[in-house]
Amino acid sequence: MHNTPEEILEKYKVYAYGNDMVPLRMESKKDLVAYYPYLVTMMFSNKEDGGHIHLSQRSFIDIEEEERLDYKIKDLKKYYNKCKRKKEKFDKNKALERILFLGEPEPYEIELVNRVAELGDKATFENLHDSFHDRMRDEWYQLMLDNGWNKWTAYRWVYGWHRWALKMNEQKNIDKE
């Protein structure tokens, strides 16, 4: 698909995943940028009502990050269960080596190891984020600001409700000082 934002607005109706009945309200480039990192799951056109674009439920940034975190936590749980079967101590340094690709560990990787060490198979990667995907979110957030989005609305859209709530709480504490 090699259409400009203007062409998309003119020629296509855009639908969110799971809602094939009502198209998203797309009136300007500002509306489109909120969906830039979403995957096109299906696209077609017909003579009666033009083109249709169906988007993924979540952004590619979120999907890819979740896949990476899921891979790492599953590997850590395999190591945890191996240690348990062999009645060996779960070695955090060895566990960290298993999930490192290059360089120094990121804070989220250390936290994953700590969670598995403490919770075993019940450990999750909830509310953890890696720096690569956060840089992608930062670029997306800036693009939204550059296209007229309110900073708090854009932040909530890009980073999610949980991180938005933390940021709002942080801002309240700064305002009190």
Image: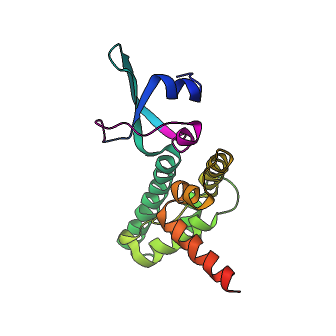
* Residue for point 52% across, 22% down: 1
Pinpoint residue 158: horizontal percent, then vertical percent. Answer: 55, 54
Left/right of residue 28 with respect to residue 81 in the rendered view = right
Quadrant that contains the C terminus = bottom right
Q: In the picture shown, does residue 12 fall above or below 139?
A: above
Instruction: Kindly indicate the quadrant of the structure image that contains residue 4.
Output: top right
Q: Is residue 137 above or below residue 113?
A: above
Identity of the residue drawn at 53% across and 41% down? 31
Residue 92 in view of the camera: no
Q: Residue furthest bottom?
A: 177
Pick whichever, 111 or 99, lies toward us.
111
- The residue most toward the front is 27
Where does residue 16 sit, x and y in percent of width and height?
A: 38, 40
Farthest left residue? 21
Tell me the magenta residue range. 19-38
Q: Position of residue 28 (x, y in %)?
A: 55, 36
- Residue at horizontal 28 percent and vertical 36 percent from the top: 21
Q: Is residue 95 magenta?
A: no
Indicate whether residue 33 is drawn in magenta: yes
- The overriding secondary structure of the stretch rendered in magenta is loop
* Residue 61 vertical position relative to residue 7 in the rendered view, above or below: below
